[in-house]
């Protein structure tokens, strides 16, 4: 079988030579070979294709000159697989008579090369028949059955099965899939010069962003505007093309847009689950209250609900009564097993409230570990919960900065406390609580001391690296230069504030601001962020429980 | 106190609320630099390079001060045609780099990233987008770029067309040369000429273009002669000056200024003493600001960087009788276009001709076309017995390069070369 990856690949030509052609859908878990054969900073999708092709028995691969990473993939594959048919067809970026003529000739040359390689012969009549058959099949294609969930359009680079699974599990209706090979191609039949007409039709598809004129994409999306709840723009690490589209859509699509970035490994699903789920929740409110639970309760007793936020650093719980009054809350450190800390926080908070578990009418979990809390009835992402929680504490809040253990996020709220937009840091620990923890360890001070110490700074030190690993070696060299801990801590806080500021800018700077998460307890970071945004941050008494409180508010809705 | 840094901080503080004031601060800085070069030139800098230094800074100053006379390009664009319309070409890489010289690259890059532009995009592109969108770079009347070599161009220039209304003309250069490809590219050059006639209101003068290509051929010849002479001489250079050569080999090639400089360069080198230390051939960009690299290579001859491949990406002579075809061929046959093996073969040939003892390849953040093939180049160098070092970092964003890491790698490599020389 020959593999292909791009929608401009002339698949039908090979089918006319009785060669099976299949789209390469890589499912790799690491880039051990690709990082050595290419470089870690090459597009992750391309690296996963390299891993896949080297590890399987493709007869060859049909590539196109779609981007620089693919051009280099072709070079490396030719070097590594000298006996396979590794062919790269040059696809022009402009569509006109000249380019179409050239592309037709490129197709002819490719056919000759494959005839030489395989000993097969290309038959133009058969090719025309295949195009006809495909056109017939296209007519018979049924529209997918309608689901009740949010109506989503997919744009960007091709999604792995994992990403599509999340959408399916949430009953999302995919109105269109404009990612690399998502849209079906149509060809005219019965042409005098079938190959020439085919070349023209291939070039005239809804363009990809490599093409000089890409306005066809906008028009295509516009056609769905009246039905669309939101757009998900899938981007791949080190493929920069579709971030341009994301930037443009954000600025003017008129519908909510989520950027979901993966590294196209099999683990991708986990990387973006929270943000995709939060996005689906924000475009269509979560329907809480499908499951029933039995509550031990006599008529006169009060009703209670519980929200649990299982984060990477702390697990937090809040019990509310029916009047939305906080009855009790508790915060425990998340140990190596999130299940154990979830049990512990449940016991603690029940003790504090002086009630038993049976008296809880509903339990909603949130946070990274939200799916692994067995006693929760349902789960909602921490983004929606933070929105609710923040609105509860201070209805004036429009922008939330949440810096937790392994995530930092900026959330924009509407006047009613609904999440309108949000962005999260990428998967590395830059600019998170974990980053500060590691730096505190390097400075040999307790994390809780980092803030107070930094207040005594004198020299303005700039920490340039935001990569946790690089920053650590930068801090080590500052220590070697005998710099003061206070000055280094101050520099670290400024670095975090810089990263937070760029997140906030992406959702828009709207007052009032609130900061949540464990890092909000660090006065050094708070001050640095306030200086950046030129405004005050509202911080509630216990900034770590905002998510759990939001979950409890959701729980109240379901009873 | 680091004055450049302090001035950069001041520009960054101003840029957010008053981009025009920040722009004025930038050209004030450039004027100061031009005056300083005239009054107190660096003693160790050879005469020809002083000329290059001055010309290069002046070019950027002009582009920011008089945007109406400039054209935004990439370094592979057919600048000779734009010159015929009185437009000075300035590449977005060059504008970005100069902002890094002012130490404000972080501000510009953060601006671009906050719009949603990918953090993994080449830093030069991000710096340029940030500079344009924040209002620091005044818009040129037109941008002319090629699709070849770097796939970021189309989207970067389309982006600034959308945000600031700078019309973008893209020359789509096929991956391989053929009769059809020649026809396709030449046709686009004709289209470009009509666009330029519309934009400037001037008529194309083909005789001038022929004269420019003649000067270009003469310029190339001078540079090749310089390299031949430089093989065994100590001609004191810096990383920055090596990059400034891109002005005369690309952005301003075909001009009298460039030819005058290169003529002087090939004579100037003959005045300098001979040397015996190892010759190093550099591949791809240079992080000109990196302390360790400056320490080992700026005005030093213990280890001598002869040239970077980027200044030698098309060494053939142009057919001055058929100027448009010659320019089309120049793009199609560029060593970075087509398969990577073309670049490998050219570097192998240059390493032989220039008698280089070692190769350093710099992997610039976000440049997929160069980093993706680095292992293939390494294989070839191994086959030739030429030691090669691969350094990772960033040509302009200081936050993506770590001096400690570069130092360890470079010093170990230089020790290795020394041992090989001794053996």
Image (cartoon, coloured by chain):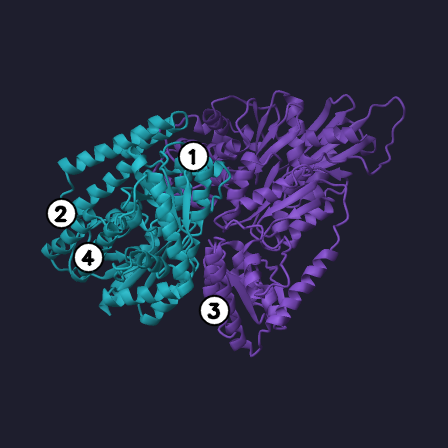
The tint chain B carries is cyan
Callout 1: chain: B
- In the visual, does A102 lie left or right of A253? left
Measure how far apart labels 3 and 2 are at the Cα level. 48 Å
- Same subunit: marks 4 and 1: yes
Residue at x-position 88% and y-position 21%? A300
Residue for badge 4: B218
Residue behind mark 1: B133
Q: Residue furthest right?
A: A299
**Who comes first in sequence, dot 2 or dot 4?**
2
User: Does B330 sit above or below residue A153?
Assistant: below
Q: Is residue B144 left or right of residue A392?
A: left
Judging from the image, mark 3 belongs to the subunit labelled: A
Q: Which residue is mark 2?
A: B47
**Label 2, label 4: how many angstroms apart (C-alpha)?**
20 Å
Q: Residue at x 29, y 48 (%)?
A: B251
Q: Residue at x 56, y 65 (%)?
A: A195
**Res. B395 visible in picture:** no
Q: Quadrant of residue A170?
A: top right
Q: Position of residue A273 (x, y in %)?
A: 65, 45
């Amino acid at each position: 079988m020959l593999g292909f990856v791009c929608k401009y690949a002339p698949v039908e030509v090979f089918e006319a030579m009785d060669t099976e052609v299949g789209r390469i859908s890589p499912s790799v878990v690491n880039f051990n070979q690709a990082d050595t054969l290419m470089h870690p900073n090459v597009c992750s999708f391309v690296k996963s294709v390299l891993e896949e092709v080297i590890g399987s028995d493709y007869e060859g691969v049909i590539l196109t000159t779609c981007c620089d990473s693919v051009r280099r993939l072709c070079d490396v594959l030719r070097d590594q697989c000298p006996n396979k048919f590794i062919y790269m067809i040059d696809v022009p970026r402009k569509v006109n008579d000249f380019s179409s003529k050239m592309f037709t000739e490129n197709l002819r040359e490719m056919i000759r090369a494959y005839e030489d390689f395989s000993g097969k012969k290309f038959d133009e009549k058969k090719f025309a028949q295949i195009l006809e058959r495909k056109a017939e099949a296209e007519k018979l294609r049924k529209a997918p059955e309608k689901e009740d969930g949010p109506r989503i359009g997919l744009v960007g680079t091709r999604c792995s099965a994992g990403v599509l699974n999340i959408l399916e599990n949430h009953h999302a209706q995919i109105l269109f899939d404009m990612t690399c090979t998502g849209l079906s191609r149509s060809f005219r039949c019965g042409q005098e010069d079938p190959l020439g007409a085919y070349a023209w039709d291939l070039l005239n598809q809804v363009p990809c962003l490599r093409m000089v004129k890409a306005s066809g994409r906008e028009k295509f999306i516009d056609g769905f505007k009246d039905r669309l709840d939101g757009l998900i723009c899938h981007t791949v690490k080190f493929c920069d093309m579709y971030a341009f589209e994301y930037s443009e859509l954000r600025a003017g699509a008129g519908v909510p847009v989520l950027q979901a970035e993966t590294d196209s490994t099999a683990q991708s699903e986990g990387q973006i689950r929270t943000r995709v789920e939060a996005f689906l929740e924000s475009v269509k409110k979560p329907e809480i209250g499908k499951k029933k639970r039995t509550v031990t309760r006599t008529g006169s007793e009060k009703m209670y609900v519980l929200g649990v936020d299982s984060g990477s650093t702390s697990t937090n719980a809040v019990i509310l009564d029916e009047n939305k009054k906080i009855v009790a809350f508790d915060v425990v450190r998340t140990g190596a097993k999130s299940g154990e800390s979830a049990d512990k926080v449940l016991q603690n908070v029940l003790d504090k409230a002086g009630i038993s578990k049976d008296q809880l009418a509903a339990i909603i979990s949130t946070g990274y570990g939200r799916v692994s809390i067995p006693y929760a009835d349902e789960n909602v992402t921490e983004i929606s919960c933070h929105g609710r929680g923040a609105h509860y504490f201070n209805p004036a809040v429009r922008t939330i900065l949440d810096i937790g253990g392994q995530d930092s996020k900026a959330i924009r709220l509407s006047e009613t406390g609904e999440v309108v937009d949000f962005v999260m840091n990428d998967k590395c620990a830059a600019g998170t609580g974990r980053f500060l923890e590691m730096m505190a360890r390097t400075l040999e001070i307790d994390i809780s001391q980092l803030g107070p110490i930094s207040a005594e700074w004198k020299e303005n030190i700039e920490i340039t690296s935001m990569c946790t690993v690089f920053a650590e070696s930068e801090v080590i060299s500052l220590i070697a230069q005998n710099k003061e801990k206070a000055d280094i801590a101050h520099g670290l806080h400024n670095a975090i504030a810089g990263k937070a500021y760029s997140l906030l800018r992406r959702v828009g700077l709207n007052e009032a601001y609130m900061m949540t998460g464990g890092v909000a307890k660090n006065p050094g970071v708070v001050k640095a962020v306030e200086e950046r945004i030129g405004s005050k941050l509202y911080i509630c008494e216990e900034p770590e429980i905002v998510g759990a409180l939001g979950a409890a508010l959701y729980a109240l809705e379901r009873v | 106190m680091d004055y450049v840094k302090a001035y950069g901080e001041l520009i960054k503080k101003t840029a957010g609320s008053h981009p025009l004031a920040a722009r004025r601060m930038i050209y004030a800085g450039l004027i100061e630099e031009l005056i300083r070069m005239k009054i107190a030139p660096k003693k160790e800098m050879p005469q020809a390079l002083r000329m290059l230094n001055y010309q290069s800074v002046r070019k950027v100053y002009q582009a920011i001060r008089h945007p109406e006379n400039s054209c935004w390009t990439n370094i592979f664009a057919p600048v000779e045609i734009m010159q015929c319309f009185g437009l000075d070409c300035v590449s977005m890489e060059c504008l970005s780099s100069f902002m890094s010289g002012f130490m404000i690259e972080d501000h510009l890059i953060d601006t671009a990233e906050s719009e949603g532009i990918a953090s993994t995009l080449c830093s030069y592109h991000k710096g340029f987008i940030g500079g344009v969108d924040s209002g620091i770079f005044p818009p040129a009347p037109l941008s002319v770029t090629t699709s070849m070599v770097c796939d970021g161009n189309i989207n970067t220039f389309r982006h600034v067309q959308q945000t600031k209304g700078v019309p973008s003309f893209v020359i789509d250069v096929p991956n391989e040369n053929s009769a059809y490809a020649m026809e396709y590219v030449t046709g686009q050059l004709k289209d470009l000429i009509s666009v330029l006639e519309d934009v400037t209101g001037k008529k194309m003068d083909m005789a001038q273009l022929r004269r420019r290509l003649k000067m270009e051929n003469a310029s190339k010849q001078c540079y090749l002669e310089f390299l031949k002479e430089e093989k065994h001489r100590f001609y004191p250079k810096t990383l920055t000056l090596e990059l400034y050569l891109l002005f005369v080999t690309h952005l301003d090639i075909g001009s009298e200024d460039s030819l005058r400089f290169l003529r002087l360069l090939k004579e100037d080198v003959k005045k300098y003493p001979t040397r015996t230390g190892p010759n190093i051939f550099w591949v791809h960009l240079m992080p000109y600001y990196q302390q360790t690299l400056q320490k080992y290579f700026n005005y030093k001859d213990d280890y001598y960087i002869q040239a970077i491949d980027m200044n030698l990406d098309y060494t053939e002579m142009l057919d001055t009788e058929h100027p448009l075809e010659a320019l089309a061929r120049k793009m199609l046959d560029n060593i970075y276009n087509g398969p990577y093996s073309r670049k490998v073969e050219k570097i192998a040939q240059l390493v032989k001709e220039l008698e280089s003892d070692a190769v350093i390849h710099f992997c610039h953040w976000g440049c997929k076309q160069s980093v993706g093939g680095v292992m293939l180049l390494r294989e070839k160098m191994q086959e030739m017995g030429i030691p090669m070092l691969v350094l990772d970092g960033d040509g302009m964003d200081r936050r993506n390069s770590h001096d400690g890491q570069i130092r360890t790698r470079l010093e170990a490599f230089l020790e290795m070369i020394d041992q090989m020389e001794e053996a």
